Amino acid sequence: MRWALVRVCLAIAAMVVVAFAVPLGLVIKEMARDRAFSNAEREAAAVAPALSITTDRDQLEKVVASAGANSGTDSGMAVHIPAGEGKTALDLGRQRAADKDIATVRKLGRASTTEVPGGSVLLQPVALSSGEISVVEVYVPESEVSNGVGTAWAVLAGVGLALIVGSVAVADRLGVRMVQPAQRLVEGAHELGEGKLGARVPEEGPTELRLAAVAFNSMADQVVQLLANERELAADLSHRLRTPLTVLRLNAASLGDGPAAEQTRTAVAQLEREVDTIIRTAREAKPQTVAAGPGAGCDAAEVVRERMRFWSALAEDEGRKVRVAGVERPVRIPVARADLVAALDALLGNVFRHTPEGTAFAVDVHNSEDAVIVLVSDAGSGIRDPEAAMARGRGSGSDGSTGLGLDIVRRLAESTGGDVRIGSSMLGGTEVRIWIQLDGREPERRGHRGAVRRRRRGGPVSTFNRSRSLP
């Protein structure tokens, strides 16, 4: 499109320049010719008063020489006086015109021009005192006729070329303004096709391209909304299925011994594995996550209160002590509500699954200027190898654990630029710290922010001190 526009503008500019430059060049040539013959007429007019007074040869020669000197020409004038009463014909200067042309002018009594070798001559009739008609011949060389025409034509050609170049440059800039929005639209379509759901196109350029950009952005917003609904559905599936399964597994564990009880527990375990496989497949098939925009997210405090009300009922049945802190005030985080619900249910489900009945647990929410920390801790026996647990969370698990819960939590934290750390809790068991970055910056990788460390002797210990000092 850009080069097509340049070619069209080039053709139009060339036609306009030719249409104006050619007639103007001809006018300049004609003006130069008129100027040369006007000078010749003035020279002839300068001799006419002398011819009307006298026909003396010596005096006329002086007049002709003076007129030639004033005009700057060299012997460019001649005077032809016809024979009269008792007088012979008199010719002064160099004759260039033919005799018949001079006779014709004398007969007609009006000026005329005729072509001669090297230029042209002006034949001007002048009446003598005797009534005869003399002819003044003024030679106009070709160089005088074309004087300045070449320079004028060169200037016209330069101006025309400059206009063509300028028009091409302007057309190129206009083409860029038209092509760039189209290119951005193409790039945006490619990025959206590659899964970059945040791709948008600036609504600028010609009206048609602006409307196309508006339509593209609207389509991209619809795609993002559809995928967000899919993500919420997947997260909702996670906590809707896994939470009842956890309750069912705990109830199955209390059935006692016997073939029927063992079959029930086996069926529940197999059902739980199948559900984990389905959820993992749905999560792996999800397109690229779209970062939450301004105003998006949820209230972490409200979500924690709501989920703890659910799990507290089950904890009461098993005699577990529950503590919740830091949820008195709203805590906004850039995470979808369904994602946070799925992460909390995954961690709390692990507490009920991997700790014996009566084991206490707690959920703490700490809020700072640039981050929100959610701590899920228990009073169980702890995790012997936190690093292996995190690695299992990134892939398929072993030892009866799929690692899906930690994988859900890790993805939630990393989507905000945060991370997940595992350490020992103040209750004596495991503490899982979810660091949710509020401004999208990478968190500082320091030990005092909860890095998993080991004592030289003994089990794992959490060095997360900063969260304890947050309000």
Image (cartoon, rainbow, N blue to C red):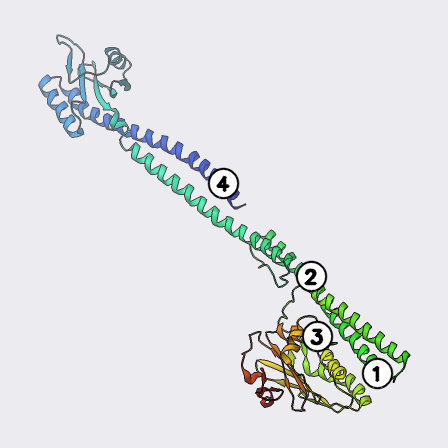
> Is disc 4 in contact with disc 2, using a CB cutoff of under 8 Å?
no
Choose the circle earlier in sequence order: 4 or 3. Answer: 4
Question: Which one is earlier in the sequence, the residue at label 1 or at label 3?
Answer: 1
Q: Amino acid at mark 4?
A: Arg
Q: Along the horizontal axis of the image, is 33 left or right of 169?
A: left
Q: Earlier in the sequence, mark 1 or mark 2?
A: 2
Alpha carbon separation for disc pair 4 and 2: 40 Å
Q: Which mark is residue 201?
A: none
Q: Pick the residue in front: 383 or 468.
A: 383
SS assignment at label 4: helix
Helix, strand or loop for disc 2: helix
Position of residue 85 relative to residue 165, above or below, is above
Q: Nearer the viewer, mark 1 or mark 2?
A: 1
Q: In the image as oriented, which residue stretches furthest toward the top? A: 86
Q: Residues within 10 Å of mark 4 (few under 14, many from 20)?
A: some
Q: Which mark is residue 7?
A: 4
Q: What's the residue at 13%, 26% (across, down)?
A: 66
* For discs 4 and 3, the disc positioned in front in the rendered view: 3
Residue 85 x, y percent position in the rendering: 15, 8
Disc 1 marks which residue?
A: 253
Q: Position of residue 90 (x, y in %)?
A: 15, 13
User: How far apart in space, not on screen, are marks 4 and 3 (Cα)?
Assistant: 64 Å
Task: Check the picture and name the quadrant holding the N terminus.
Answer: top right
Look at label 1 and name its amino acid.
Ala
Check disc 2 and report the residue beneath it.
223
Query: Label 4 to label 1, Cα distance in Å?
Result: 82 Å
